[in-house]
Structures are given as C-alpha cells and as structure tokens.
Amino acid sequence: MIGQPLDISIEHLLRELTPQVLGTVVRKFHDFAAAEDAVQEASLAAALQWPREGLPDNPRAWLTRVAFRRMADYVRSESARRQRETVVASQTLGFAFIETELEEDDTLVLLFMCCHPALTSASAIALTLRAVGGLTTTEIAHAFLVPEATMAQRISRAKQSIKNSGIPFQLPTIAERAQRLRAVLHVLYLIFNEGYTSSVGPNLRRGDLSHEAIRLTRIVHHLQPADTEVAGLLALMLLTDARRLARTGAEGELIPLEQQDRTLWDQQQIAEGIALLSATLPKGSVGPYQLQAAIAAIHDEAARAEDTDWLQILTLYHLLSQMSDNPMILLNHAIAAAMVYGAAKGLELLDALKDDARLANHHRLDAVRAHLLELSGNREDAIKHYRAAAGKTGSLPERNYLLTQAARLSNEQ
C-alpha cells in the first residue's frame, strides 16, 4: 500500500535502510554476494518507483520483499543448486512474518557477520564499510590510504574468500562476537570519521554516517558495558560530534577548530562523553580510543582556543604514537608539538613522514606542513603546500578552505 507522502529524501532513506535489509537477507540466505546484488536491485526499484508512487507504508518491508524475490529468482536459476529450492520456497512463501521480524535492526547483526573468520582484519573492515557504512570503494580506499584499484580488488577477494571458505555467513556466537569486537570497533570508527569529515563531495560532513556510527556504538556499549575501549570509542564520537554545528559557515564553508563559535557546541553531548570517559579511565586498561577521547575532551573543555592545554594533548599523542603507527596520529602529534615547542619542532616530526607511502597522495600531509610553514613565517612555501593539498583532496569544502588560505597569504605578501 502507498500511504506516506514523499516528503523526505529517498536517497537518505535508502542509505539508512540498505544495511538493515542486507543484514536480514544475508541472515536468511547466507550468501553475501548474491544478497548484496538483490538488495541493490531492490534499492534501484525503489529509487524508480517511490518518487512516482509515493513511499510505501513500511519502506523497509517493501525493500525486503523485493530483495527476497530477487534471491528466490537467483537460487532457482542456479541449476547446480536446485536442491536449495525447497529451502527458498519455505523462506519466501508469503511475507507476513516480515512485518514483525523487521522490528529488530539487522544492521548490527550484519556488522558482526562481515567480520568473518575467513577474512583478514583489513578485508573484513573493508567489506563491512561497504555493506554497513554504504561507503563507495573510493571512500574506503581513502580511509585505508591505498589506491582505489587496490581496494576494489580487496573487497572482491573478501567476498570470494567467504564463498570458498564454506563457513556460513550467519550471526556469530557470543564467543565469536567477542573475538570480532576489535574489528567491529574499527569499522565504526572509520564510518564515523567519513561521516564527520567526508573525503569526497560538496559537503564537509555526512550526518547520516556519523549518526549511524554513534547509534551502533551505543548498542555495542549496551551489549559490552564493561569493555573500556567500547566506552572510549563512544565517548570519542560524542565529544567530536558535539562540534558539528560550529564546523561550517552559512555557505557550508569549513571553519577550523580555533575559529569556531564554541557556544554552538553541544554541551549535552560533551557532558555525556566526559562522563563516559571519567568512568572508564580509572579502570586501568587504557587503549587508543580512550586516549583520543581524552584529547577531544581537552579541546571541548577549553572555553577559548588559547586556553587549550596543548602540553597535555602532546603527552597523550606521544602515548598514542607508541600504541599505533597510524600516520594520522603522527600528523596530529606534529601539530601538538608545534603548539608546545614551536613550528620548527612540528616540521621536524613531519620530515619523518615524508617517505611514508600511505601519505604520498593524501592532502593532510601537505595541509599540516603548510600550516606549520605559515606559523614559522615561511609564507612562500606555505602557499605552495596549501595549493598542493587542495589538489589532492576530493572534499570541496576542504579544497576551498586550502585555496583560500593560499590566496590570503599571497595577498599579504
């Protein structure tokens, strides 16, 4: 039945529903590749029909019905698997159960299912970002700091590895969930980051992704309340997302942290994040997410940019750099060192990263170098690196900001 008027973004709705429907279809049929194709076909059908006919009363059930029918067609066409038709018939005879079964959100189920034992951690994370986060191959490649072609091959091999393993693609046991938890947290972290600062496109952020990452992390925290890193990740997301309204101006332009109107920061989210962190840190086991959350808390608690305790931030980044060789952490470490000891120290730390292949085509290395060169008084080289950074980013707001910085310095010369 067609009941609701088309008064919301269909693209946004489909992005929200697709991982939920995919989780349901995979859980029923245990074939990720075929299920993904079926859900994509269902989404395409919705994109064509819903603008013309209006939204169905239950869009999620509509998508699931269509995807189930596509799966039934797929299995029936596989002559070598004709014995499965009986199973398919029992699963697709009528769809009355969907209305009640879909009360549960299968997105988290899909999240754990994608962290499959047949996959390496990197492949599992890439596959999950595609299935749960709805990220494109380009966006995932950007998050992993690898070429797009490399990531496309990785995702394709991940699907084939699952198929060849013979291990059912199904909800893991409680013990298996515990084993996959770290990969799940990393996926949620990457989804949030892509939502908070989109790597491509006209908008600085994708609120649908960051909000979904927070929602799912809340669920994981509810399931694992004693895990300090789960709490740390949720705190990090809340403390970071609290600044969202102040990050862009009236025209969507990027506003850097030091220039933001801090009265626009969400104090309720900040309070919740700090409470989570305060309850977690004394427990003894401190991990990377808790340390990053602590850094975010220091920024959020500073009434003015000049009140920021950069020495404490530098100490925390030093600890983080000992836990991880993530180049983004090392970049931020260089910024903190520059704020404490001067731009020359920050530039010295950056020099250690210039041959890191993971950063060869990433705009942030040039952007940070430009900023520190500007602080050191070297405007000519700062302009060069601002422009180089602008040429490497796929984010229009970031590109405009970097070009504006270069133009500002040119005009001041």
Image (cartoon, rainbow, N blue to C red):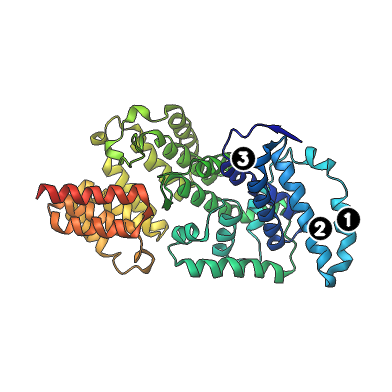
Residue at numbered disc 3: 219
* In front of the other: 181 or 213: 213
Q: Visible in this render: residue 92?
A: yes
Residue 19 in the image: x percent, y percent? 64, 49
* In front of the other: 7 or 78: 7
Q: Is residue 114 above or below residue 315?
A: below
In what element is the residue under mark 1? helix
Q: Of the residues tagged 1 and 3, which is closer to the observer?
A: 1
- Cα distance, mark 2 to mark 1? 8 Å
Q: Is residue 256 above or below residue 166?
A: above
Q: Visible in this render: residue 108?
A: no
Q: Quadrant of residue 154?
A: bottom right
Residue type highlighted by circle 2: Ala
Residue 180 in the image: x percent, y percent? 62, 56
Residue at numbered disc 1: 89
**Left or right, residue 356 beside residue 231:** left
Q: Earlier in the sequence, mark 1 or mark 3?
A: 1
- Cα distance, mark 3 to mark 2? 32 Å
Circles 1 and 3, Cβ within 8 Å, touching? The answer is no
Q: Of the residues tagged 3 and 2, which is closer to the observer?
A: 2
Residue in view at x 53 percent, y 39 percent: 211
* In front of the other: 26 or 394: 394
Residue at numbered disc 2: 72
Residue type highlighted by circle 1: Ala
Tell me the crowding category of disc 3: few under 14, some 14 to 19, or many 20 or more residues within 10 angstroms, Cα based.
few
Q: Residue furthest front?
A: 52
Tell me the crowding category of disc 2: few under 14, some 14 to 19, or many 20 or more residues within 10 angstroms, Cα based.
many
